[in-house]
Image (cartoon, rainbow, N blue to C red):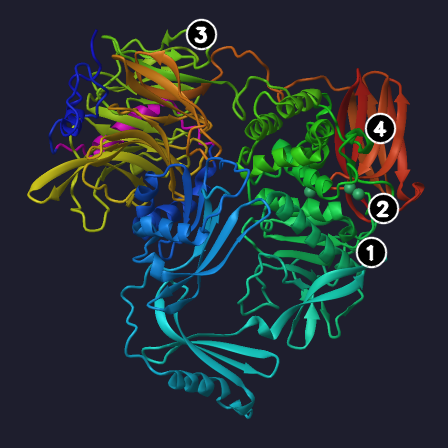
Amino acid sequence: MAFYGAKTISLCAALFSISYPLSAGGPVGKTVKIDSETQLSKQHIEGVASWINDALGPAILTDTSRARNDYLYQVLKKLGVDPVQSAVSSIEKKPDWSVVWDARNGTPVSISNNSRAPLFKRAAPFSGFSRALSILDSGRAFFRLSNPSEEFRLVEEFADETGQRHVRMAQYYKGIPLWNQEVTFHFGGGGNLLSVNARYSPTPADLNTENTIDSLTAITKALNELFSGNKVSPDKSEISAGKYIWTDNAGTVHLVWNVQVKRGILEHWIYFIDAADGKILMKYNSSVTGRAHKAWGEDLTGTIRQIDVYFQDTSYCLIDATRPMWVSSQDNILGNPYGAIWTVDYQQAPYGGISFRNIFSIDNSWNDPVAISAHRHVGMGFEYFFNTFNRLSLDGAGGTIRAIVHFTGSNGLPYDNAGWSSSGFMVFGDGYNCKPFAGGLDIVVHEMSHGVVQYTVNLEYVFQSGALNESYADIFAAMADRDDWLIGEDVSRSSAFRDMQKPSNFGQPDHMDDYCNYTLDYDNGGVHINSGIPNRACYLIASSIGRDKTEKIYYRVLEARYLNRQSQFTDMRFAALRSADDLFGRNSFEYASVKKAFDEVGIIDSNDPPQVNGREYIAAVKLDDAKRIYLIDPLPEGVSPAVLSSISANSISGKPISIPDSRQLLFVDNKNCIRGVDFKSGTERVISNDGVWSSIAMTSDGSRLAATTKWADSSIYIFDLVNNSNSKVYHLYNPHAGAIRNSVIYADVLDWEKGGRFLAFDCKSKTVNGNDTVQYWNILFLDIETGEIFPVFPEPAPGVNYMNPSLSRTGLTMMVFDYADIENGIMEIRTSDYGRKVTGRIERTGRTLSFPKFSSYDSSVLFTTYVNGDNSLRKIMLDSQRLNPSGQSIEIARGFIHPNWFVSDNVQSSGSSVVSRTRKNGISSFSVSRLKDGASIEYGLSGKSRVDLHIISLDGRMVASLYSGFKDQGRHSMVWTRRAGKKSIANGLYYCRLTVKEDRKNYSEVRPVLIH
Ligand SMILES: [Ca+2]
Ligand SMILES: [Ca+2]
Ligand SMILES: [Zn+2]
């Protein structure tokens, strides 16, 4: 048997010679390159690029995800300068914990345990405060504190009804309080730490607390400023001063005099005056000038309701400042409140633009029932999400919820609808065909839920993903307004808008067989129509397991991000099942109920992975003498491995294979040439016969190929296959502050971020440690638009190596990589979400580099490890955060290395896609022409059928039924005028929908019609 990498393990040998003698055979090592200063010329690169372009054909360029790059750029920029980089190494020791950091000062603001906390039946007596102090003390470096027990004082400690114990502490330094700096610990009944939330400062050790101005000087400063040019004397004012350590918005601490001046009943000025030089650092009129009040007013049902309003200056307005998200000190409450529920008035202003004003009352009497209903219903919606899911506001972060009432439609009439704006507010019209929309709790929660969806999985508002967005809005609407499954029953002048129990009551399909394949110009592809199908699935689940469990399953899908922006109905099935699995287990009745419900509406398990035609396969290099590439079926009952390449792959390189799309596989052969294998035809060809290449990676749109050479040339070569003259050599450098800039020796593994602008790579670098020159591996990002290089991790400590990065396939800021800490003998696969600055651990790999790769949907990781003298190709499922595993790894095959996932429809898959279902249409013709106050309609039928003709508003509500009944084969026509129905329809654009039922299947077509 030939052991893989016999010549290539010198790094490994070097790595492990410190703590591990390298055993015979040995694990896969890192690339060793020829020591050479050789560099290819730009001219040469352009030549290669044009060969590749010829060989591959034009780039597909369908990917529009470049927009993400700005975000990624910001993330990377921050990584480069952020003091919280050290987070990675601290939390690496505790992979069960997630930490969110204060970007200003590098302190943790949230620490939470990812694993389920053990349950304790009875609370054991313990002091949460001393436990909290000892945790702070044992993690001084992590918390950035020097002497926690002197720096924190207890504010309150209490146990709640579940037995959890909560400890709130205030921060001090040398006995001086830090202004509003707090840390709160939460313990389970057994004393186990559950979570921590905090806003505090690192110990301000550099702060000079001596030689300050005295309090009188500070007070004089404040009064001079406040009363300058003012006739009112300070005599009537209440004045106090106290010494604090105050943190400004940039996170810098100052020793200050906090001077407070109360003047009259409306002013309470707070000054922060630098105790060193008397400078006024900040001042504001505290919220004492305004106060939350209760008020009463009549709502749209004629009932007197209690609401929460806000008093400031001389009047009251509809700002609810009583919610737990309310921010106590803010300076523009009437203009832009934080953490409020804020109802404002559009005043029926002309359509277009957003102009609104506060709804005021001088004497706290209220006489606008629309505003009262809106304010109250938004409050109830807030409570629904907060009490049911502990969700703080729509964005989950306490953002103000804005509702605009008395909105105007584009036809100049009162808006006959309600809406959510992606800018983060809701509008409610007073209605024309309908009653004022704010009067429906389900309508209000429907719009709020669009906000919750936007701030979580942000489903794109077209076709199936849009229908899922609509469905989610209806689902929470029906959960908050829990007495029925109707939507809009309190607003509609007939019965309702939609019925989740029986969607067909309002012209919606309730089974995939009746799915309406509308084009984008009709209701964004039927988002308000086809939502009937997932709506009914939800209803069926709830009728089996109850609403309480159902809403938890649906909310977890959002919270765990089990859907993507373009998720389809089948993905909703997978997501709901996954969520039910998390909450109740795979063998539970709840799981089975979810499955049954989706089956019943025809959203079936198609065996197709979501969003892509085809299945996931693996291509890997077989570790025999020939080292050819094989196709491996990851399914347990799948086909056995089959040869893909006739030529040996370059197994010395860290990444010899790149599969940008389902068309073909590129690889570097053992002569350092680039070759391609076409999946469809099976043909193999030479793409570059240069004989110099080592690792390759192509962008998913096929527009760029990155490569390294066999030389230690400190370079990455980018072939731009769209614009050849942009092909370039990037000379690598070390971006860490204080590092030797030209200390990068060579790069090995390459991987593109989904958008194709940023390339992650690992590189061998050198550093000086005392008298020794030490070599180590690190992971960096190259921005190919600017040539800038960003670090992902802090400069590795001695003995630490970051290697073999693989990035998220779906556009998350996720990376999976090999981590080797030689000093401490740790070798493991780790994950990092460098956007959120959290890390996880996948698996310890003993002494093996694993070359991990995300699967096509980031749901699992593929890697190799060295087991019993052979390389085991393994797969491990990830949890919802994609940070930690959700189970044990399983072996897929033996004797393979360098695995790569890809999706192909090349091999026959066992199911058919739900969305691609084809069917014949019973409608042979359909035309609608406009008449004054109506329309003339003509249509043809290919057989005797049941026919429904409806007028539908732009958002899919049926506003008039023109005909329902059977019609014979042939042509039919009718004239309809709007006065013919019982109720009138406002001027505007509508759709005429013709639905034909044949063989128990509905076929629908729509035509626009202007009614005027
Ligand atoms: Ca109701
Ligand atoms: Ca309802
Ligand atoms: Zn909606």
Label placed on residue 985:
2
- Whichever of labels 2 and 1 marks the residue nearer the N terminus, that label is 1
CA gap between label 4 and label 3 equals: 49 Å
Kind of element beneath mark 4: strand
- Quarter of image, res 622: top left
Label placed on residue 696:
none
- Please tell me which residue is depicted at 69% across the width and 65% down the height of the picture: 309
| Residue type (three-letter) at the residue carrying disc 3 | Val
Residue 513 is situated, as x and y percent measured from the top left of the image, at 72, 20
**Position of 79 compared to 598: left or right?**
left
Q: Nearer the viewer, mark 4 or mark 1?
A: 1
- Whichever of labels 4 and 1 marks the residue nearer the N terminus, that label is 1
- Whichever of labels 4 and 3 marks the residue nearer the N terminus, that label is 3
Q: Nearer the viewer, mark 2 or mark 1?
A: 1
**Position of 361 compared to 584: left or right?**
right
Residue span colored magenta: 38-62
Tags 1 and 3 touching, CB below 8 Å: no
Q: Residues within 10 Å of mark 1 (few under 14, many from 20)?
A: some
> In this view, which residue lies farthest toward the front?
125
- Please tell me which residue is depicted at 31% across the width and 52% down the height of the picture: 140
Residue 805 is situated, as x and y percent measured from the top left of the image, at 32, 32
- Please tell me which residue is depicted at 47% across the width and 57% down the height of the picture: 168
Q: Nearer the viewer, mark 4 or mark 3?
A: 3
| Residue type (three-letter) at the residue carrying disc 4 | Asp
Residue 926 is situated, as x and y percent measured from the top left of the image, at 79, 28
Q: Which residue is mark 3?
A: 639
Label placed on residue 300:
1
Q: Residues within 10 Å of mark 4 (few under 14, many from 20)?
A: many
Q: Which residue is mark 4?
A: 948
- Whichever of labels 1 and 3 marks the residue nearer the N terminus, that label is 1
Is disc 1's CB within 8 Å of ligand 1? no
| Residue type (three-letter) at the residue carrying disc 1 | Leu
